[in-house]
Amino acid sequence: MSKETPALFGKTKLLEGQIDEFLDKVAEGAIYFERGISAFLETRNTCETCEGKLSQIIELKQRCRELQRSIVNVLYSEMLIPDFRADVLRLLTDLFSLLDQMGKNFQDLIIERDQSQEIESKTDDTGNEIGKKEFLDLVQVVVKSIETVVIAARNFFRDPKSVKDHTYQVRVYESEADKIAISLKKKIFATDYKFSEKINLRDIVNAIDAIADLAENVADELDIYAIQRTL
């Protein structure tokens, strides 16, 4: 019979609650990112919605910073999990970077909004249509990668042997995001948009796709942390 790996913070409910809240905030940030990008792609009248979603992401970042500081304090002051403390802190830092990058990339898109508002359905030189739907497809896959890596992180604390099942899914989503991004950029450069508009749209695609790359990086680290926990 295989030995079951115990929950990492089974006797420390306060710390467990703080980490759960931290993970909740990262997952919540993915929702705001998706809603914000969707609004961004719609019409000129959605600027207020975009700003609102950005503000929500910024608030989440502030709360995550507070939680990080509190978690660090508890881990060291109570001398908890010395063997895995560094892994936990690195994981929280990596996940915060994911939330932070969502906010930064979305903020950059809003700042450059005047150029980006021109996204509309057009047909490339092979007859394929390109429009908001293609961008939204990319956003949805990217958000899936974030949501799944958060699930993997939760399992690291409760059931590390199952982490690899979810990190594998993150890689699938990241690969799919890359495929959508490449296809989308090819379509963009085959349209009759001005060259400056093509560059701008390409940058939007890259900014969205980059989030899935970060999620995959976190998944790679999680695999290592989980293996160390089960040894």
Image (cartoon, grey):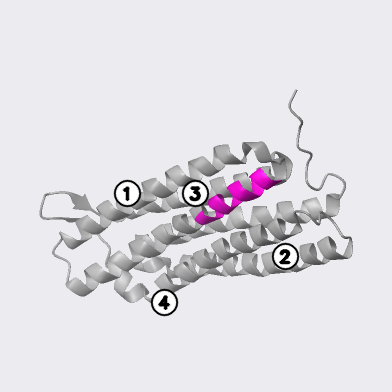
User: Is residue 139 found inside the magenta-colored segment of the image?
Assistant: no
Camera-nearest residue between 27 and 153: 153
The residue that label 3 is drawn on is 145
Which mark is nearer the camera, 4 or 3? 3
Q: In this view, does 57 lie to the left or right of 84?
A: left
Q: What residue type is labelled 3?
A: Ser
Q: Do the residues labelled 3 and 1 touch (CB within 8 Å)?
A: no
Of the image marks 3 and 1, the number of the one nearer the N terminus: 3
Task: Say few, some or many: other residues with alpha carbon within 10 Å of mark 3 (under 14 / 14 to 19 / 20 or more).
Answer: many
Reply above or below: 123 against 77.
Answer: above
Q: Residue 111 carries which label?
A: 4
Q: Is residue 95 visible?
A: yes
Residue drawn at point x = 57 percent, y = 69 percent: 55
Q: Do the residues labelled 4 and 3 touch (CB within 8 Å)?
A: no
Of the image marks 4 and 3, the number of the one nearer the N terminus: 4
Residue drawn at point x = 28 percent, y = 54 percent: 182
Residue drawn at point x = 67 percent, y = 42 percent: 155
> Horizontal and vertical percent for residue 110?
42, 72
The residue that label 2 is drawn on is 68
Q: What residue type is labelled 2?
A: Gln
* Highlighted magenta segment, given as a residue range: 217-228
Determine the CA span between mark 1 and mark 4. 27 Å
Task: Say few, some or many: other residues with alpha carbon within 10 Å of mark 1 (under 14 / 14 to 19 / 20 or more).
Answer: few
- Dot 2 falls on a residue whose secondary structure is helix
Determine the CA span between mark 3 and mark 1. 14 Å
Q: Are marks 1 and 4 in contact (CB under 8 Å)?
A: no
